[in-house]
Image (cartoon, rainbow, N blue to C red):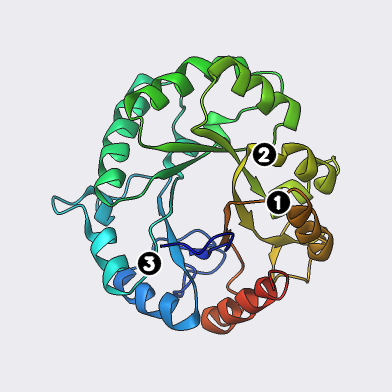
Amino acid sequence: MQEKNKILIGIVQGRLSNSPKNRLQFFPKNYEKEFKIAKKIGFDFIEFFTERRLNKKNPIWKNKNNIYYELSKKNNLKLHTFCDDHIISNSLLNDNYIKYLKKLITNIQKNKIKNLILPMYGKSLMTDSNYMNFIKKFKKILNYNRNINIYLEGNIQPNTFKEIKNKINSKRLKFLFDSGNRSVLKRDLYEDLLSFKNELGHIHIKDKNKYKVNVMLGKGTVDFKKFFLILSKINYKGNLTLETSRGDNFLKSAKLNLKFVKKYLI
């Protein structure tokens, strides 16, 4: 049971493993090992994901497709979020993708996961000018399974998301705020965070430098002291996932990044 008002901290799957050079988002070969590491370090959950290119070796597609649930329970980790990166290389407007997504939603529910992240980039890029194209698809997804929350991730303005919410009128649709991605936009990161307020469902924590490259937390352009003060001000009730850099040593980096975030939550 989650303690009242406690913000849980998770880490993206694959960040507790080595990866090929310049591959930040990488599905781990030994995914089982990450559960023990995550618990030992002090994370509350692992955020699972599907890759841009379909990977049938991902346990979410296996016949015994509640593997994530069993491994999380065994290692005393929560089950919280699942991110579908496949949407980046396959348009949400394509009916074949919707068929794929329905199967994914069915499988993540078998793993007791209630929150699905849709990163609206690439072939599914959502902007302040084209968002109306996606409204019907969002409704269809929400109506398909009423036990799943949808978190939209993107670069849209707070007012645009509020328009989407007005059109759809569902409490199960929320916004995912990415500190790193939003920091490189020609907008005020902190004003946006304040404006999203009650629409925030989840937050990805990462830092980027002036060259838009992921770096260790505190080494980039994000003012995390200001960032977490705003979260406190708006009484943010969601959780956090570290989508952070592995650095030279993934284990050392994960520990340092977790420690960095925790000091703002005391």
Amino acid residing under circle 2: Asn
Q: Can you say which quadrant of the picture contains the N terminus? A: bottom left
Judge the density around disc 3: few (<14), some (14-19), many (≥20) Cα neighbours within 10 Å: some
Amino acid identity at mark 1: Asn
> Which residue carries the number 3 mark?
28
Residue 13 shows in the view: no
Within 10 Å of the Cα at label 1, are there few (<14), some (14-19), or many (20+) other Cα atoms? few
Real-space CA distance between mark 3 and mark 1, rounded to the nearest whole angstrom: 35 Å
Task: Specify the label residue 198 is tagged with.
Answer: 2
**In the structure shown, which secondary structural element does the residue marked by tag 2 occupy?**
helix
Mark seen at residue 202: none
Q: Which residue is mark 1?
A: 235
- Residue 108's place in the image compared with 259, above or below, is above
User: From what the image shows, is residue 157 above or below residue 52?
Assistant: above
Q: Position of residue 245 (x, y in %)?
A: 61, 68
228 with respect to 205 (left or right): right
Q: Residue at x 61, y 75 (%)?
A: 258
Q: Residue drawn 52% across and 82% down?
A: 251
Indicate whether 139 appears above or below 213. Answer: above
Q: Percent position (x, y) of residue 142?
A: 41, 26
Mark 1 or mark 2, which is nearer the start of the sequence?
2
